[in-house]
Image: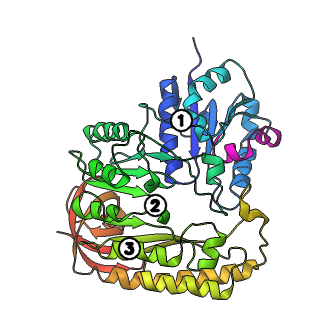
């Protein structure tokens, strides 16, 4: 009798990684593997990694070290994703019990690599360089969310921001055809999913290989698929953010009224050093487009503090931009050097304590902005998609079209199912969430 093939997969990082893992899981199942919930129960242990955050690769090696004892029990290990692409065959030197190392651009070769693994090979690599034109499409995606589905429409990045490792780990920008994206959207809707999120490192840099649709036109077309009630997209790059994206949101009700537009800094000098290819004025013009929309659109962003060469005056300019835009959400981080990036050779002379202080000042100011912004919703009736429940508090949790968390009271005998939609009257607000009552 053949031994059952089992696997355990842990995912680190962003939504792109989470969706890649769905495709990997689907491919593994297609190859006859069964997913298990614990490393100890798996014959094959895979870590799908991210290299964006500080010390990301160290966290992966720490995890591998924690479980290397399982190697003696016949377990096989695989490292996938960005850290795999970044570290390459050095992973075998640091963790000799790893048998497979593959970057995301090579996942289409996963069935072949699994066959080699099963045949007894102990050092298998899938490390395509950034010049590949292939995207990882598979009909075997094992979607992990019962109501929200992801579609990657563009992979890789050609921007080469000086602090960012993505172009080196994800490869060049390569887009899927609009026809294949829409075919997948129709299939997803037929399966009962009501929310679709379009993904890409720079999702709005999408260029249709068929030449049929711009990003805005594709966005609108997905929003018009029968059965789809919400369409989101992330992450946009300001350099490719065009006015027709706002016009599409205005004209297609299913497109969510939320835009995530990373600014990174409010200083023109620092933006130039980051190689962001825009100025604060360019960025604020796009914010003005968003704010002039027919319906209110929530805006969120990413900010890096303490970039090499940043001064107190540069930081003040970022704070000024924060006050001008009045974001609904900010993801802010202290700068940390990433391998293989141009910023690695820049002199990082800002003490960690000063970076930490700047970050704290920024987050405290942003918290006050959000407190004011969220309180403006009191009295509104918003549509909420249910995501879960907190029985202890008698509350249901969900999210508005503006991507704002909403917790609301529910007194009925049966809690609404995740993925259902309810109208909720907002009766209270916190800096990071809204409180309401089901209407």
Where residue 178 sits: x, y (%)? 36, 41
Q: Say what secondary structure mark 1 lies in.
A: loop
Q: Earlier in the sequence, mark 1 or mark 3?
A: 1
Q: CA distance from mark 1 to mark 3?
A: 40 Å
The N terminus is located in which quarter?
A: top right
Highlighted range, magenta: 80-94
Mark sitting on residue 433: 3
**Residue furthest out toward the left:** 439
Where residue 164 sits: x, y (%)? 64, 59
Q: Is residue 396 visible?
A: no
Q: Report how many numbered discs are placed on residues in the image.
A: 3
What residue sits right under mark 2 in the picture? Answer: 240
Q: Nearer the viewer, mark 2 or mark 3?
A: 2
What residue sits right under mark 1 in the picture? Answer: 134
Q: CA distance from mark 2 to mark 3?
A: 30 Å
**Residue furthest out toward the right:** 93
């Amino acid at each position: 009798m053949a031994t059952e093939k089992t696997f355990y997969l842990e995912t680190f990082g962003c939504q792109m990684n989470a969706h890649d893992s769905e495709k990997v899981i689907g491919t593994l199942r297609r190859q006859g593997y069964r997913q298990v919930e614990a490393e100890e129960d798996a014959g094959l242990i895979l870590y799908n990694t991210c290299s964006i955050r500080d010390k990301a690769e160290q966290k992966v090696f720490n995890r591998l070290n924690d479980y290397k004892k399982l190697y003696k029990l016949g377990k096989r290990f695989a490292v996938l994703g960005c850290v795999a692409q970044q570290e390459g065959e050095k992973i075998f030197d640091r963790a000799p019990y790893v048998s497979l190392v593959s970057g995301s651009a090579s996942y289409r070769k996963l069935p072949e690599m699994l066959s080699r693994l099963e045949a007894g090979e102990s050092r298998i690599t899938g490390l395509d360089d950034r010049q590949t034109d292939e995207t990882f499409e598979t009909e075997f995606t094992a979607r992990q969310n019962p109501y929200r589905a992801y579609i990657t429409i563009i992979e890789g990045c050609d921007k080469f921001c000086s602090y960012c490792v993505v172009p080196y780990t994800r490869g060049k920008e390569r887009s899927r055809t609009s026809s294949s994206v829409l075919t997948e959207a129709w299939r997803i809707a037929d399966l009962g999913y009501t929310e679709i999120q379009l993904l890409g490192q720079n999702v709005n840099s999408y260029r249709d290989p068929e030449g049929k649709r711009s990003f805005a036109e594709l966005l609108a077309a997905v929003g018009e698929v029968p059965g789809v009630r919400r369409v989101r997209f992330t992450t946009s790059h300001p350099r490719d953010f065009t006015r027709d994206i706002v016009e599409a949101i205005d004209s297609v009700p299913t497109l969510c009224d939320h835009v995530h537009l990373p600014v990174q800094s409010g200083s023109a000098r620092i933006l130039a050093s980051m190689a962001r290819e825009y100025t604060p004025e360019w960025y604020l013009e796009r914010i003005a487009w968003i704010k002039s929309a027919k319906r209110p659109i929530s805006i969120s962003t990413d900010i890096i503090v303490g970039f090499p060469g940043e001064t107190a005056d540069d930081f003040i300019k970022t704070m000024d931009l924060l006050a001008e835009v009045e974001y609904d959400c900010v993801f802010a981080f202290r700068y940390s050097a990433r391998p293989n990036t141009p910023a690695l050779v820049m002199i990082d002379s800002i003490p960690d304590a000063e970076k930490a202080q700047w970050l704290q000042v920024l987050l405290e100011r942003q918290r006050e902005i959000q407190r004011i912004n969220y309180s403006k919703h009191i009295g509104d009736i918003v549509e909420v998609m249910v995501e879960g429940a907190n029985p202890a508090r008698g509350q249901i949790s969900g999210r508005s079209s503006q991507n704002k968390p909403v917790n609301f009271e529910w007194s009925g005998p049966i809690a609404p199912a995740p993925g259902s939609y309810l109208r909720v009257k907002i009766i209270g607000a916190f800096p990071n969430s809204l409180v309401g009552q089901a209407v």
